[in-house]
Amino acid sequence: MKYFSTRGSPDLLTFSEVVLIGLSKDGGLFIPQTIPTLPSDWKTSWLNHSFTSLALEIFSLYIPDDEIPRKDLERLINKSYSTFRASDITPLKKLRENLYILELFHGPTFAFKDIALQFLGNLFEYLLEKKNLEESLEGKNTTKRERITILGATSGDTGSAAIYGLRNKKDISVFILHPRGKVSPVQEAQMTTVLDKNVHNLAVEGTFDDCQDTVKTLFSDSQFNQKHHLGAINSINWARILAQIVYYFHSYFQFFLSLNVSPSSPEANNIKLQYCVPTGNFGDILAGYYAKCMGLPIETLVVATNSNDILDRFFKTGRYEKKVNDGEDNGKGGHIVHETLSPAMDISVSSNFERLLWYLAYGSIDAKSDKEKVNLAGSTVNKWMEDLKSKHCLTVEGVHLALALRDFKSDKITDQETMETIHRYYAPQDSRTQISYVLDPHTAVGVAAADKQKISSNTHLICLATAHPAKFSAAVEESLKSFSEFKFQEILPTEFVGLLEKEKRCVYIERADPEIVKKTIESELEREVI
Ligand SMILES: *Cc1c(COP(=O)(O)O)cnc(C)c1O
């Protein structure tokens, strides 16, 4: 199995290269040469697998054994998920008839990004160690070990999940820029109370976009980049998508086990499953698309957006259109992002969407050879991405759009609906058929979309719960303020108690100036390596 870019460049890369490089030179995203199919007996032989055993089977389909031997892969997986608090890693809970919640927030930072980033951190460490070992066996570079410097900007969740994934990892330093005072107090404390020597938080005076722009400038500074071997952890890294495929399979089996129906029985064929996914950068739901393409019987994937609705508009019209300020008001001709109660989904474009576009292009081509199809798909994606860049809009029509609608539906949820949904599920109308549940605002976007679906009685919805409600306490408390019996303390995880008062380490950056950030990174690195 090799990987190539969505923009058609002919290079074939290994899994390890794709993980370490992140983004292709031509600006495209890496995808596997083919989507692997499942072993013919998977419905029975995988039925009782634990989360980690399933991860091993699924990862092995995408990672050749001569790159990472199976026993090493198994060790990496076990280590990555040993930090989770739930024994089945991603528990499935029934909220009411036909509606289930898949809890993805039992990792160290209480949000779903841990599932991928715990693995990615261990994977980075493993690949670097292997490289250093190979180099010392070849007799070169014996005194100087290869190190990488992970650099990223965050508006909250990605930063803390990356820090917990990379803390105390050998030969890896991590620098996370966040806009000072603009991330929630819990998120800020989760990042800055990690005191490991290799973790560096930079609190930048400015906005998230300023942080992001600074990071981009440093990545394109080839001298600085080469000197420090910069690496990225953003959501386009293939390993993150791969890790997320697992819980679609895991929840499928959990669901059938809970019904006491064998997935390979004729009865199972009459049961339809849809997944409802609160979506921002299209990473979480894209993993579901891969699961479906591999052969997991998912009827539909429901994209749920907040009022940053570029994806919902795409699935309704075929137009993928970025909202931009045409006036001079924000000085950048910049993108418009609405602030909502689900901030981890506040985006102007979805960075992983290009991968789906590739499959839409590829799937609609009537060409003779696969090579021809791959070439044509690359040039179609290129054209679409050029349109997006020059006109802020790309249009997908006819067979392409029909192909998208075969697998996806979408809905857009307002903040008002989000709050009503949190309210409604805390106080179920009929407690015999429905449990009381405190939803976080991101999960509530997915559940609100699920509630709007018109489904038959043999269709079941699984909503992905992407964060613990205590992480976004303001929205939850506001939604539940009319319930005098609701006490926030009761849902507060013990890990959060006293978090805000713990010792912190963070470097203050007076403005988002790449030169200041470069100097800070170098002086911090010097102190760290001593
Ligand atoms: C990142 C995030 C999302 C969105 O996931 P995407 O992969 O970007 O679609 C949703 N909810 C929470 C809590 C997140 O942190």
Image: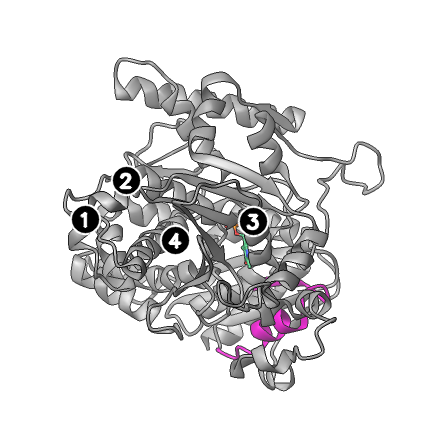
Which mark's residue is nearer the viewer, 1 or 3? 3
Which residue is at 48% across, 72% downward? 198
Which amino acid lies under the numbered mark 3 shown in the image of this protein?
Answer: Asp
- Mark 4 and mark 3 in contact (Cβ < 8 Å)? no
What element does badge 1 sit on?
A: helix
Q: Residue at label 3?
A: 451
129 is within the stretch colored magenta: no
What element does badge 4 sit on?
A: helix
- Whichever of labels 1 and 3 marks the residue nearer the N terminus, that label is 1
Q: Residue at label 1?
A: 42
> Residue 145's image quarter?
bottom left
Crowding at dot 4, Cα within 10 Å, few <14 / some 14-19 / many 20+, comes out as: many
Q: Taking the image as drawn, is residue 28 in sight? A: no
* Residue 295 numbered mark, or none: 2
Which amino acid lies under the numbered mark 1 shown in the image of this protein?
Answer: Trp
> Residue 132's image quarter?
bottom left
| Residue 434 in picture, x, y percent from top left | 51, 63
Using residue 168 as the reference point, say whether residue 252 is left or right of it.
left
Q: Distance between the residues labelled 3 and 2?
A: 26 Å
The boundaries of the magenta stretch are 176-196
In this view, the residue in front, 416 or 111, is 416
Which residue is at 71% across, 35% downward? 323
Which amino acid lies under the numbered mark 4 shown in the image of this protein?
Answer: Gln
Query: Is residue 50 positioned above or below 343 on the image?
Result: below
Q: Distance between the residues labelled 2 and 1?
A: 10 Å
In this view, the residue in front, 432 or 270, is 432
Which amino acid lies under the numbered mark 2 shown in the image of this protein?
Answer: Gly
